[in-house]
Amino acid sequence: MQTSITFVLDDKLQTIDCASSGWITPTTTALNYLRGLPTHKGVKEGCAEGDCGACTVVLGELGNDRTIRYKSVDACLVLLPMLHGKQVITVENLRTDRGELHPVQDAMVETNGSQCGYCTPGFIMSMFSLYKNRDHPSRAEIEDALTGNLCRCTGYKPIVEAAAKSCVHRGLDHFSEREPHVVELLESISKESIHLRTSNQLYMKPASVQEAITLKHQHADAIIVCGATDVALRITKKHELLEKIIDVSDLSELKTIAESEAGVSIGAGASLSDIMPVAEKNFPALYSMLTVFGSQQIRNLASLGGNLGTASPIGDMLPVLIAYHARVTLESLDGRREIPINTFITGYRKTLRRSDELITAIVIPNLNGGIVVRSYKISKRKDLDISTVNGSFRLELDGNQEVKAIMLVYGGMAERVKQAETCERFLLGKRWVRKTIENAMPLMEKDFSPISDARAGTEMRTVAAKNLLMKFWGETTGALIDNQLLSM
Amino acid sequence: MENNIPHESAAKHVSGEAVYVDDILVNDQLLVGRVVYSSHAHAKVKSFDLSQAKKVPGVHMVMCFQDIPGHNQMGPVVKDEICLAIDEVTFVGQAIFLIAAETEEQCINAERLIKVEYEPFEAILTLEKAIEKNLLLGPPSTIKRGDVDSALKKAPHTLRGELRTGAQEHWYLESQVCLCIPGEGREINVYSSTQHPSETQALIAELLGIGKHEVIVEVRRMGGAFGGKETQANHTACWTALLCWATKRPVKIRLFRDDDMKITGKRHRFLSKYEVGFDDEGKLLTAKFELNSDGGAAVDLSFAIMQRAMLHADNAYYIPDFSVMGRVFKTNLPSNTAFRGFGGPQGMAVIETVIDRVARYLKKDPAEIRVKNFYGLESNNVTHYGETIENNRLFMIYEQLITSSEYHNRRRSVNEFNASNEFFKKGLAITPVKFGISFTTSFLNQAGALVIIYKDGSILVNHGGTEMGQGLHTKIQQVAAAELGVSLDRVKVNATNTSKVPNTSATAASAGADLNGMAVKNAIDILKSRIAETMAHIFSEQYHDDPTFRDSIVFENDSIIDSKHPNRRVSFTEAIPLLHLHQVPLSATGFYKTPNIGWDKQKGFGKPFHYYAFGMAVTEVLLDILTGHHTIVRTDILHDVGDSLNEGIDIGQVEGGYIQGVGWCTTEEIKWDDKGNLMTHSPDTYKIPSVQDIPRDFRTALLRGVPNPDTIRKSKAVAEPPLMLALSCWLAIKDAISAVANHQFEPEFSLPATNEVILLSIEKLKKNMEERITLDFVVQR
């Protein structure tokens, strides 16, 4: 067992022992750590909640093929021990040894992509991640890579241009040249489990699921961290002292995505980014929700297990998982059990998970032919925003175009995710025609009495819930929606 | 002049090397400061206890109002903003105590131990309530031409209505921050992210009870400001200075994002009422506007902002009989403040709504109504406040943009699209901007500079303007290099510093380059005249037979040359030490004040503006009427910056201003709860535009061949005016909503047009269609 963490920074191994290093604690964020150094002030704090991207850094993770995967993350949402075994790249590392700017930096200068410059290091790092991962990216790919970065000065156009201009060298740069050296450094870092103990905190990073379950058995009061995009806010925004943490973010066993004829089992720790390819192939409604979920920086950290485990009332993944009849796998020393997702969450931040259990997987059954699932999200801003209202719908029609089975699952309409049961009952057995939908829409008022909050008022939520049913009908029948528009 | 150069700090920005206040390396004596603020919107502070907080290990200081050595005040114009509350708080976020400790955690722990007993009073939290109670922050004012009431009676058609425009949070990426380092004796060095170093200096001096000469304020750059650091950077600076004075240690306060959003003021929300008379052709005959703004708990710049709103309520349109009344109301919210446009957007939103309604009423294309009402070139060219519009570019821009944007073809395609789609609608709008350039408080239109030539021929330019990303220092560097005929790399623009250039105005009103560019030119002219005199003398000594006269000395290609005898030349590098030997003073101060302006606030008459900046935008949106989501399909902008000092920078200002305006018009919504707590206090709930929100096709051009007389290198200000081009996006959304009812009904509409506003407006239209009720507010004669 190790009592310190090690990562690569500035091409050197950096070892940190929280017990002996004054200001650094196990829950210090990567942002505060880096800004605490005299040499990495380029990493900026804009919001400390993952919404602005000014603190974007790139993490290099060692793959099984001895190459490095480069992922952009918000340093404000990364707890220091999550850096263990990884390479941390900040904006200061992008110039070559000779002082030349990296192609993404050069392009930003050329296109006037910076004005006040405060968001710029974050954009540069998101663009660097894009540079390493996509050659000649499309505009959609560029925008997806930059959605997590806010700029208040430029209006973004020159930044998009800079990305298009620079990401054309198949990812080659001085990092490619030095990669073998960094791989060696990363391989030299021990994979043993870690316990960081200070006078008032215990941070455990188990090396296997078995160990994690055992730890959870011993420390029922420990908080499970799996990506930290939600837990980190308790530190940065509420200034809570988290006394005991079991961090399963890097357990490779929890990152497996297994496809079978029956469906797909997604490891609870797989990042949302890792899930996107299989979602695109098998579960388009899940995929469409993922594309408007957070930002790339957040999806690179966040996991389905974490999203379900926190049982946040604003967890945008839940309705669509319910509509797909997904199940949660829980493991403890007593064994394994599976729970349908719609019964798993019982209230505000409450679930059926026992305190000694760990979410290990989410199983999504494949759809039988004829069943349609779609998801919709209404938010004030289309991207990197939490739903005002979202709806995920599942429909099965019989040969007479009559409703054989239907689920209308809504988020944002009640304290927790809720089905429009009156509406569903009404629709059952009816013909799937516009008149039916128009008659069903007013019933939403029986199903929901939504709140008024910072995102929207009661009336708007009710209108939106009704409209989404109409939209679903329109899309399933294809009658009234111009398909060309949907791609816009 | 070298024009297309990148921002002078671009390479530093992209490499993370640019130093902002929070990045300045300070020794390990630095303390972290924290402001503790009111949790009540309006209450009496009955008692408080700081004793437990003071005991927290690592805490060096916990201060309250009693510990202030000088004047407990930080109001910029009117002295109505107490630095630390005494016995009453008037908004959530008002500072009461200050803490300095070795770490942020210690500050937070100490804050948790402060006990305050409040006695809550009634709080006024809406503009409607403040109007109902007539809680004015100061006297109302009116600008008026003609007899509006009788003109309204005579007009063939009249419309009336009201419009709400929302507040807007600046959302500069760098939150408010200040670092103070004590010097010897009473000296204090202040590194503040402020647009107005001289005011920051003055307020700190008064607060500490010391002379201004003891306070040095320096600003290298800001991470965005947009008006939010014109007066309200002072607050954080004052608090930091107090803690620095009390602890005799370096202290830094950087507001956490949520605190920044809760504590600082926003763009003023307005509730405006209008009544307008027009003829069958849509020509405006008369208008009567009543503008009401939410000033918040203190005056700040509210009256100057209201004034600018009133001076822009005409926008680009000639209205023969026109009166605008403006009132600023007091509420128990943070004092609202400057924000790019400074009232202009709120004023323009009203008249643009009027034009839009007139067009819908007459069933004409709004573009046609707009051009029909533009100020004329020769006649109908005097504003309601008496300024004659010279160099009117409206028609020039309109004609070029209508053609380049293919407006008329696209209007037809939009109509066709709407006829054949039920769940998606398109909208199209063109809107103009005419924006007056100058501070309306005329004496503020002055600037100073200090230009230094060192013996190695390197040049350091100091001026009173601050760099917040707008590229001011880049433009100044270009101007200085061009005026001295030297290469750019010879010129460095220094951090703004009150000990170099004193008594400056805020970098605001879009006038940074206009004022400071001229002041720098003035300093350089003085230097050149001295140098020319001595160089003429030196050349004449070398060539006795045919002397060199000072008037023939020119500065070009990094050399000083006798233009009559081109062989008499000396490189700048060689000349400077020579001039030093000849005892020529190689530094000079420069000064500039804007000529020929004058404005009588009381009468509401005069020439407040040196000139006007013009621009126009055409925006097309696609609206999903079931979700209320819109996409900006295409935007075409043509904007007038005179002879651009730097095209890359100017286009960046235009595009960035437009998108910031789009945010104000669409997704940026500020909400307070019924206790006066800001609900939208983080980017989680407050949504500025992201990269996905920009036009799918974004075409920006600068108007060519129109030099601006009587400004620095014939340029025009840029900064603010383009923000208001976004009204075209707002009205395009309204056009799309209106299409739901085939333009037969006037849609309910306000600003921002969030998807909530959009969906509810559509619901209302659907009801109207069902009930076939007629237009609501129309009075037909």
Image (cartoon, coloured by chain):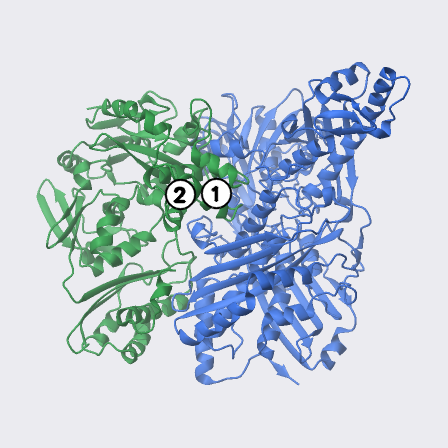
Chain colours: A green, B blue
Residue under pointer 2 = A49
Disc 2 chain ID:
A
User: B136 and A233: which one is in front?
Assistant: A233
Disc 1 chain ID:
B
Residue farthest to the top? B581
The quarter of the displayed image where residue A326 is located: bottom left
Q: Quadrant of the C terminus of chain B?
A: bottom right
Assign a secondary structure to mark 2: loop
Badge 1: how crowded within 10 Å, few (<14), some, or many (20+)?
many
User: B664 and B718: which one is in front?
Assistant: B718
From the top left corner, tell me how far across and down residue B337 is, in percent: 62, 50
From the top left corner, tell me how far across and down residue B247 is, in percent: 57, 25
The quarter of the displayed image where residue B401 is located: bottom right
Residue under pointer 1 = B257
Residue B569, placed above or below residue A465: above
Q: What amino acid does circle 1 point to?
A: Arg
Q: Quadrant of the N terminus of chain B?
A: top right
> Badges 1 and 2: C-beta atoms under 8 Å apart?
yes
Residue B195, placed above or below residue A323: above
Cα gap from disc 1 to disc 2, whole angstroms: 9 Å
From the top left corner, tell me how far across and down residue B125 is, in percent: 55, 58
The quarter of the displayed image where residue A165 is located: top left
Assign a secondary structure to mark 1: helix
